[in-house]
Image: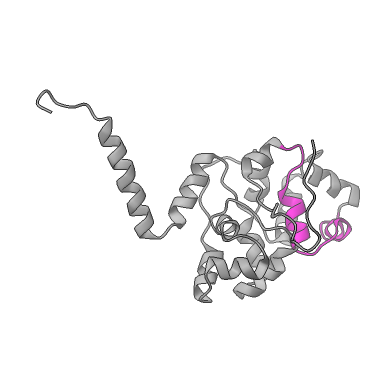
Amino acid sequence: MTTEATEPDKPEPDINIVHYDMVLASVRPILLRWAREANGLTIQQLADKIGKSRSVVGHYESGEAFPPFDVREKIAEVLGITVLDIERERGVANGRWVQPKPILMNARNSAGLSLLKVATHLSVSHSTVFLWETGQARPRPPLVPKLAAILGLSVRDVVAACAPMPQTLEQRMQAAFNAMPEVHRERIVRMVENEVDLFRPKGPDS
């Protein structure tokens, strides 16, 4: 398979969108490595903090091994994520997915910034920032400190906000719908109701 060469004076294509179904289809879990790199830690530094060897942590990140519960707790504390995030990434978590609080969106609104303004600062598209805010994608680790600085948050705040991800297409759609302005949600509801009306059985006098 061939790929198009990018011009040296243009930024690389935005490849930081990683949907949860892509994560499940991958042999290598994404969350642990992403959260570690977003926190600016090497594998050895994380290993030292949780009392494990570098190779063991490497196996956790590659999916060759799954940390026991006490180790998951240590990893979660160091990286600013939750045990449930780690378990959900491997598909072993039970319970209904709950959309995370809109930390990024609230911080952006409090700072008086638009999606486009944040996107311009980070050289990504405004739709990419929208995916971050709705929990449908995670920013590449090098962008996490920059995003935190723009929004007036800590790196751990951003990591915690971006760690949870919806597990199904329905959940991603619900997350996107919930993040829309009310006027847009109302418009979509009306459109759906109109479509449903077209398929409703008609009475004999219709």
Q: Quadrant of the N terminus?
A: top right
Q: Quadrant of the C terminus?
A: top left
Q: Is residue 53 visible?
A: no
Q: Residue at x 50, y 71 (%)?
A: 109
Q: Residue furthest left?
A: 205
The percent position of residue 139, horizontal first and vertical second, equals: 67, 58
**Which one is nearer the viewer's eye here, 44 or 126?**
126
The percent position of residue 153, horizontal first and vertical second, equals: 62, 72
Query: Which quadrant of the structure image shows residue 45?
Result: bottom right
Q: Is residue 37 magenta?
A: yes
Q: Is residue 43 left or right of residue 109?
A: right
- Helix, strand or loop for the magenta stretch, by majority: helix
Q: Is residue 198 left or right of residue 20?
A: left
Q: Residue at x 44, y 54 (%)?
A: 178
**Which one is nearer the viewer's eye here, 133 or 122?**
122
**Which one is nearer the viewer's eye here, 4 or 168?**
4
Q: How many marks?
A: 0
**Can you say whether 61 is above or below 204 in the image?**
below
Q: How is the image coloured?
A: one colour
> Which residue range is magenta in the image?
26-51
Q: Is residue 16 left or right of residue 94?
A: right
Q: Is residue 166 visible?
A: yes
The percent position of residue 196, horizontal first and vertical second, equals: 29, 36
The percent position of residue 164, horizontal first and vertical second, equals: 60, 52
Q: Is residue 151 magenta?
A: no
Q: Residue at x 60, y 69 (%)?
A: 118
